Image: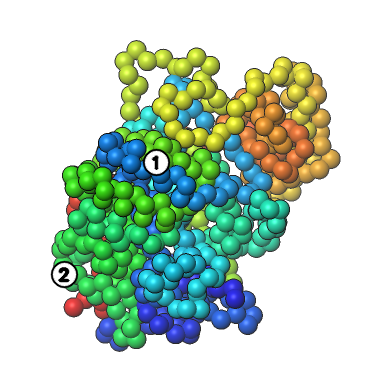
């Protein structure tokens, strides 16, 4: 049975509640349900899924916890080697667009982008024992939590961008390793359904299509073993502005009950905090995301202050729980790789960790009440800052050591990283001479929305520009396209360097070069940003700090405190 893409929070929630998203609170009133609305889009005849009890929202923390656990004590490193055989892996990217991994900067330092995915899969006894309706067992999973972790090239700062699970996107074509094809969607699809289109590799593909951020790795987490990891650090301080009790009159809610001010939570109470929707802010999933951010930054501070995780036996037990609870891409399929990654993450002090939410707006499209879409302009501003390795906290990156100089041969499109980190970027040969590079040019000047007509004869005009730059094999293609920004696509790894040379000659950024099954050779798609002239319209300067709509939370902010939804106090 296909489950709805939306999950309820309270125990034994009736099916009608899942559709309406309402429900009286403790005072008998019906709180507004915006952004995190439970309005589903079930297919005809489908039974709306019910979710309840302890579940799903904590597994995103398991990824960070597991990395920190693995990196807490170097002496325990060899103790984990036997866990290698327990690591579950899956394909990194099932989509057609391959961005080739993060590129080194001028100093040979390479940023790192990791997509943290929280799966609500309930397909084994351990997960099922934590509660939930039996009609959800062994059903198709949903990616209910999605966070992109960006580690800066110089390791001075870390940015985390959450995407609300109710975000509506166009899904890319995804092809499973066995050959099964999930066609690109013809309309908007809720982002958490991406996991059902072949696995985490399709969630990665959806993020890359939307953000144009090269994703190097993913970590997909379920929630078994998470409670013991939360207990390991002896609790996490959290704060509420008023007494809070997450419980509605009809029994919904996480059950969280805390007094006003700061409390130290762990185990079951930590689960309740991280899945609380009713009771925080306006009672939506957006508020729940903000609570998760507060917990994650507080947890990071506690890990650095806490010295209890030095017992090798305890560390081994916790590491086993973490490993058994997650799936990673093949680039992270060994304990030593996870250990190295944990060492990289530990370099960033809490004060340079910034938690944000993708700027969003409520959808105005018919049938999508309560759903959200990326906010025009501001969501792209956040994505661009990540692409260009700009710290979201506005403090900039660290300064290279005195006397440092760029690594030989390092550039925006290649080089040897100065800081070792797992990578899946392909190694490419040097580019050929321009006169030997064949380039097809397609007219895509109408843009993706199709609001403007394509400029006539534009492919021929731009082919002439390329010819003037020495690319004498450039020709206009009879096929067209639809792109907002000009992009260079190539078909095979052997063509990557040549495609980069085309982009460089035209002054295009490295992020404009993509590997794609859509083309058979190097193809330049002339976008809406290049309707006239000999070069694309340059983008405005990149922002230096995340927009306020991203709701940024700094890792050193010990004063963060959750607002409590009216009617959920005691």
Residue at 45% x, 50% y: name it: 86
Q: Which mark is residue 81?
A: 1
Q: Position of residue 27 (x, y in %)?
A: 26, 85
Residue at 41% x, 14% y: name it: 405
- Disc 2: which residue: 259
- Relative horizontal placement of residue 256, taking residue 11 as reference (left or right): left
Instruction: Indicate the quadrant where residue 184 lies.
Output: bottom right
Q: Earlier in the sequence, mark 1 or mark 2?
A: 1
Q: Residues within 10 Å of mark 1 (few under 14, many from 20)?
A: few
Q: Nearer the viewer, residue 149 or 266?
A: 266
Q: Position of residue 442 (x, y in %)?
A: 76, 38
The relative height of residue 78 versus residue 567 in the rendered view (above or below) is above
Helix, strand or loop at disc 1?
Answer: helix
Identify the residue at the far right of this view: 478
Helix, strand or loop at disc 2?
Answer: loop
Q: Nearer the viewer, residue 309 or 424?
A: 309
Instruction: Indicate the quadrant where residue 366 lies.
Output: bottom right
- Of the 4 image quadrants, the one containing the C terminus is bottom left
- Of the 4 image quadrants, the one containing the N terminus is bottom right
Residue at 36% x, 43% y: name it: 80
Is residue 429 in view?
A: yes
């Amino acid at each position: 049975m296909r489950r709805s893409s939306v999950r309820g929070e309270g125990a034994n929630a009736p099916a009608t509640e899942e559709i309406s998203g309402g429900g009286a609170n403790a005072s008998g009133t019906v709180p507004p349900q915006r952004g995190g609305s439970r309005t589903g889009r079930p297919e005809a005849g489908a039974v709306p899924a019910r979710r309840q009890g302890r579940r799903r929202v904590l597994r995103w923390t398991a990824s960070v916890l597991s990395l920190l656990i693995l990196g807490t004590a170097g002496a325990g490193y060899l103790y984990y080697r036997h866990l290698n055989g327990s690591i579950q892996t899956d394909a990194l990217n099932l989509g057609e667009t391959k961005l080739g991994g993060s590129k080194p900067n001028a100093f040979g330092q390479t940023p790192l982008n990791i997509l943290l995915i929280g799966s609500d899969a309930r397909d084994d006894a351990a997960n099922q024992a934590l509660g939930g309706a039996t009609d959800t067992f062994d059903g198709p999973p949903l990616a209910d939590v999605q966070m992109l972790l960006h580690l800066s090239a110089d390791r001075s700062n870390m940015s985390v961008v959450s995407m609300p699970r109710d975000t509506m996107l166009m899904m890319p074509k995804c092809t499973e390793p066995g050959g099964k094809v999930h066609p690109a969607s013809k309309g908007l699809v809720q982002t958490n359904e991406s996991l059902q289109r072949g696995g985490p590799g399709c969630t990665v593909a959806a993020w890359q299509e939307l953000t144009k951020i090269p994703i190097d790795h993913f970590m997909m987490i379920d929630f078994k073993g998470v409670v013991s990891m939360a207990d390991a650090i002896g609790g996490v301080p959290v704060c509420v502005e008023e007494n809070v009790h997450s419980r509605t009159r009809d029994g919904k809610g996480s059950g969280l009950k805390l007094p006003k001010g700061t409390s130290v939570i762990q185990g079951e109470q930590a689960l309740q905090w991280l899945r609380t929707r009713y009771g925080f802010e306006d009672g939506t999933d957006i508020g729940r995301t903000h609570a998760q951010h507060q917990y994650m930054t507080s947890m990071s501070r506690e890990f650095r202050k806490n010295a209890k995780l030095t017992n090798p036996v305890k560390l081994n037990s916790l590491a086993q729980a973490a490993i058994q609870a997650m799936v990673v891409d093949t680039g992270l399929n060994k304990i030593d790789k996870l250990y190295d990654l944990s060492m990289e993450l530990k370099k960033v002090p809490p004060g340079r960790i910034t938690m944000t939410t993708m700027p969003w707006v409520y959808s105005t499209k018919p049938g999508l009440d309560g759903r959200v879409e990326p906010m025009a302009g501001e969501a792209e501003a956040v994505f661009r800052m990540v692409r260009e390795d700009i710290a979201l906290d506005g403090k900039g990156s660290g300064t290279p050591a005195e006397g440092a100089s760029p690594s030989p041969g390092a550039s925006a499109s290649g080089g040897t990283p100065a800081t070792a980190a797992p990578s899946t970027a392909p190694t490419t040969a040097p580019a050929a001479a321009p006169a030997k590079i064949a380039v097809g040019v397609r007219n895509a000047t109408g843009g993706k929305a199709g609001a403007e007509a394509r400029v006539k004869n534009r492919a021929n005009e731009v082919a002439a520009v390329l010819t003037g730059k020495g690319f004498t094999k450039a020709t206009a293609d009879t096929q067209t396209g639809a792109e907002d920004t000009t992009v260079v696509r190539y078909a095979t790894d052997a063509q990557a360097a040549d495609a980069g040379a085309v982009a460089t000659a035209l002054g295009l950024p490295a992020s404009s070069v993509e590997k794609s099954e859509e083309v058979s050779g190097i193809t330049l798609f002339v976008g809406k940003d290049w309707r006239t002239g000999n070069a694309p319209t340059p983008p405005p300067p990149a922002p230096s700090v995340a927009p306020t709509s991203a709701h940024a939370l700094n890792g050193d902010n010990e004063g963060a405190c959750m607002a409590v939804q009216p009617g959920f106090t005691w």
